[in-house]
Structure formats: C-alpha cells, structure tokens
Image (cartoon, rainbow, N blue to C red):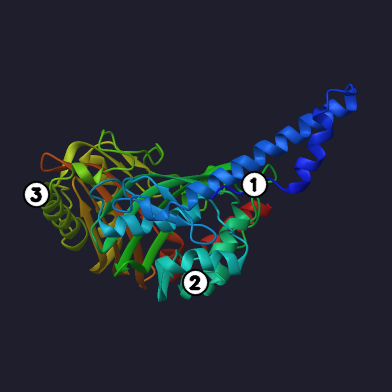
Amino acid sequence: SIEPCPPPFEAMRAPLLDDSSAQSWPTARLWRFLELVAVFCAGGGFLHYVGSLENDAPKDGATKLATEGNSSLVLPKKDPLGGVGAPLAKQVVLAMGNIISFHTEWDNWTAWSKEMAPYWTEDMIYDFGYMGPWKFGWAHGLREWFDGEHMHYNRALPDCQFTDFIRAATDTTCTSVSYGLARWEAPYAGVPPPASKPWVRVRDLDFYLVEGDKIKINWCIIDVVDMFMQVGYNVLPPPPMATDGYLAPKAMDGWPAPLSAKVDPETTAASEQIWRAALHEDYRLDAGDARWWSESMVWYGPGGVGTAHSSLEYSTHWLRPLHAAFSNVTMAIDIVVCEGSYCGAHFYLHGIHTGPWLGEEATGKRVSIRCGAHAHIENGKIQEGWLIVDLPLAFHTLGVDLYARARELALA
C-alpha cells in the first residue's frame, strides 16, 4: 500500500489554503517547499509499492539485486563478461580485473581483500617478475600479494591505467597482453624516478590457471628494462633493432582480441599446433630459421632487443644470439593458452652461459630466463609476436644487479 504523508503536513497545509488572508512572500516560499515534500512522499510511497511486487516480477534471465526488507530491484538480462560464449576463465579474470582496473579500495586491506576473495583460491599464488632485494615476486595468498608487489607497484606508479589488447582463454586458463600508462612517482624496487616524474608505458602480460571458478595461479611480468630505457636509465647496451613500442594486433578480431563468440574451435586447434611447434623449434631445437613466422611478420621484442619487421630480423637479432650465448638449453613450459588466432605461453629457458649476451661476456653459470610470449597466427604463419623477458631475473643468475645499475644512473 502507498504510505500517506505525515499527519503534521496536513495541519501545516490547511492555513495556507485559507483564501481569507493573503499569502505573504515568505509564506509562498514555505508553500513551495511543502509541495516538494509532498512530491517526495508520493515518490517514496510509489517506490515502496513497486518494490512490493516481487512475486509478480520476472525472474528467468534476470539478475535480482536485493534491497531492504522483502523488496528487490530486477535488472535486465545482459551478456556475460567477455561477451556471449566467453570461456569461464575469461569471465572470472575479467570480474577480478575490474577491481584492479578501478583501483577499488587499493590501499585498504580489509575492503580490498573482501572484494578480491571471491575470485581466488585460498592457496593462490601470485608470481610477479624478479624485484631484487624487495623479494615481492612470489606471493602465497592475498595478504602476501597485498603487502608486497600490490602496494609497492601502486605507490610507485599510482592510478596506472591498463589497456588489454589480447585476452585469450579456455574454461581453465586465460592470458592477457596489455600496456599501462602512469606517472612514475616513487621508487620502484629501490630505483627512484626522474625528478620530473614522467609518464611511462608499462608493458605487461598475465597468465592465469583457474580451478573451478577461482584463480589458482597468476603469472605476471612487466618489462622493467623497457620502462627504465624510456626515462634514460639504459642498463643494457643499445638494442640491435629500433623499438617500435608494444602495439595491438593489426586485425579486427575484437577488443581485446579475440571475441569469443566469433572463435572457431578448429582455428584454435590449428593455432595451438603451430604455436607449440614454433616454441619447440625456436627455443628447444635451435633451428634458427623461424620457419613458422611470416616473412613480413612484426615481433615486439623485449627491452634491450627491439622490434623485428621480418622473420630474418627476428632470427638474426634474437634467436641466433640467444643460442650462441647458451649451451645445453632446456625448456620448461608452465602454461600454453590459445583461443582462435591468438596464443600465449609462459616458460623458462635454462642453459649454461658460454657466450656473450646483451653485453655480458660468458660466465659459465647456469642461467634461468623467464619468458612470456604471445602470437597472432593467420594462414598457417605467425603474423605478429610479443615477448617479455624477466631480464632482471636472468641477469641476477649471471651475478648482475640491473636494479643497482638503474639506481646508479638515477642518482648520477
């Protein structure tokens, strides 16, 4: 039923309707105010009435948002996150990612953990890139992640806005390729920003393993060397190729690519076969001819290497120097994800450092090289590629501290 306005309102209203006495200007103003009160009361009564129609409201295909008492708001049916046909892992990662993107309660553990907990297993692992003595790379559980890399990154690069341009997934795995835009405002792993606190573009990639409807493992790497280079902290020799950025695919496959509803499962299977073969031949067999890559491909290499605009440049400036520098190379793949024409892999290369590499002479040490690679595959060939290497980790195993180098340059 519609709730009436409070009885005092009627008592106050009666003298104002008495035509025997003229209404003064203040009285007229008071009357206008009371008219607004009347509208408010009527509106509240109407909403209460609508809310009471719960039993008559449609429930199939609609989302209900509970309010006080027995009333509810019925929201219209809408597409799932990632669009119609999005695999489960893509939906879970997108829901969690919205909390990251909007920086929801980013510096409040109690509120942030409440928002994040529904999307992570209790024994979750967040595996970030090597950060030297800060040791934020490997976090067990939300609290370790929050107190470690999460707070450190958000203080150094506050309000970093990420744009994902690839997001491929299955029901149990997901990967994304993105770049963030932020001002570098506070020290990152002990490296202070330039005095101007410049804008930087942060190359980023993520891989996810989903268990049920929760994230079990998140592998994440940013290209720290590239970020340092942008502000003049050149911790490596000049790259052999020009650096053209970390650009989105030259395709209309959705944003981010691919749009799941458009994906043909046969395309996914063919892409994965080509991708696994390319990884095996490029890194494990030392084939060196990049035969799975288009001659006109574009490959966005890591900081210190640059961008290749042909399979010959890719082979000449990345594959051949890599295999010339390391002997007895083994490869350990953590995860491979393909959807449609897009694939990704997170893996480690292990080898003995027996030749020069990125300015470092042979040390004879066994080195771990952590990589995150992605590919856009069309017509049986890789047309575009993206690679981030955790170079601070690789150089750490060589006995070189790239963060210390950057810090010296920053303070010089």
Q: What is the number of the mark on residue 285?
A: none
Query: Are the residues at dot 3 and dot 2 in contact (C-beta closer than 8 Å)?
Result: no
Name the element at disc 2: helix
Can residue 125 be seen at all in this image of the molecule?
Answer: yes
Name which residue type carries label 3. Glu
Label 2 to label 1, Cα distance in Å?
Answer: 50 Å
Residue type at mark 1 is Pro
Residue type indicated by callout 2:
Leu
Res 4 label: 1
Question: What element does badge 1 sit on?
Answer: loop
Which callout, 3 or 1, points to the residue nearer the camera?
Answer: 1
Q: Nearer the viewer, mark 2 or mark 1?
A: 1
- Measured as percent of width and height from the top left, residue 12 is found at 82, 39
- Residue denoted by label 3: 266
Q: Nearer the viewer, residue 46 or 128?
A: 46
Task: Specify whether 139 is left or right of 16.
Answer: left
Left-right relation of 386 to 406: left
Where is residue 276 drawn, in percent x and y?
A: 16, 58
Q: Secondary structure at mark 3?
A: helix
